[in-house]
Image: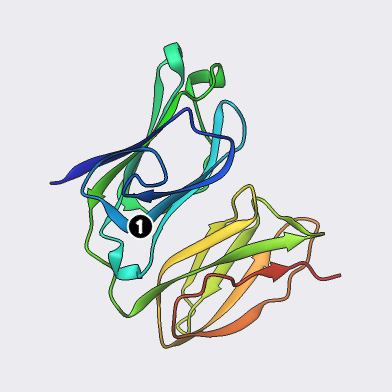
Amino acid sequence: MDAWEFKVDSPPNGVNTYRLDGSDGGTVTMPPNANMTVTYDRISSTTLGSWFISASPLSALDRRVSAVIIKGGSSGKNVYPYNPLATFDNGPFTTPGATQAISHISFCFERSLAPSAATVSVMGRVIANGQGVSRARVNIVDENGQTRSVVTSSFGYYRFEEVEVGQTYVISVFSKGYQFTSRLISINDELTDLDFIADE
C-alpha cells in the first residue's frame, strides 16, 4: 500500500491552498500531482478548521487522506485518522489541549481508485448578510429519496463528493436563524459555485 505525506510548516492563518507538487510551498513526500490541491482554513493559532482536497479534472484525484496530524511544538501532536479515506472534513482540529500554536500540519495520503466518470463533485457556499454561515446543514436528496448531509465550514463552504450524474436532486439548507429556498437541480457536470443565500 502506498502511503505519502504533505507537510506544511508554520501554516499561515486563514484559507490556504497548495498544489500537491510543492509549487505552492509545503513538503511533498509522494509522487507529485500538479492537478490536485489541498485547501484548509486555520481559524486560530491552535486550531485548524475545515479542509478538503480537489482535482481538475476530477479523474486526477488519485489519492485520499488517511489522517491529518496537528503538531503543537513541545506539546506533541494530535492524529485524526480516516477510515474510509476522506476528501474533506469540517473539524475543528487542535494541538494537544489547544495549549500551543500549530507548528506544522501533515496530510497523510493513500492511493485510491479514481471516481467513476459517472460521478462529480457538487460544492458551493451558504451565505447570510454577505457572510458565510458556519455549521449549516446541507442536504442532497436523489430521485430514490436517498439523503446525504454535510455541514458547512467556518467560512460557509460545503462539498459533496461522488454525486451521480444524470439525476435530478433536491438540495436544501438548514441553519438556525435563517431560511433558505430549496433548489431542484439536474446534475450533468461538476458544480463548483452552487451557492445558497438566505431569504430576506
Q: Residue furthest right?
A: 200
Residue 107, given in percent of the width and then of the height, sits at 35, 40
- Residue shown at the point (59%, 74%) measured from the top left: 171
The residue tagged 1 is: 36
Foreground pick, 184 / 52: 52
Image colouring: rainbow
Residue 189, given in percent of the width and then of the height, sits at 44, 81
Foreground pick, 31 / 136: 31
- Residue shown at the point (59%, 50%) measured from the top left: 153
Q: Residue furthest top?
A: 74
Q: What is the quadrant of the C terminus in the image?
A: bottom right
Q: Left or right: where does residue 111 sit relative to residue 197? A: left
- Numbered-mark total: 1
Tell me the amino acid under the disc marked 1.
Met
Picture layout, residue 118 above or below residue 148: below
Foreground pick, 2 / 138: 2
Q: Secondary structure at mark 1?
A: strand
Q: Residue furthest front?
A: 23
- Residue shown at the point (23%, 48%) measured from the top left: 110
Picture layout, residue 142 above or below residue 198: below
Residue 192, given in percent of the width and then of the height, sits at 53, 70
Q: Residues within 10 Å of mark 1 (few under 14, many from 20)?
A: many
- Residue shown at the point (56%, 16%) measured from the top left: 99
Give the image quarter of residue 75.
top left
Residue 4, given in percent of the width and then of the height, sits at 23, 41
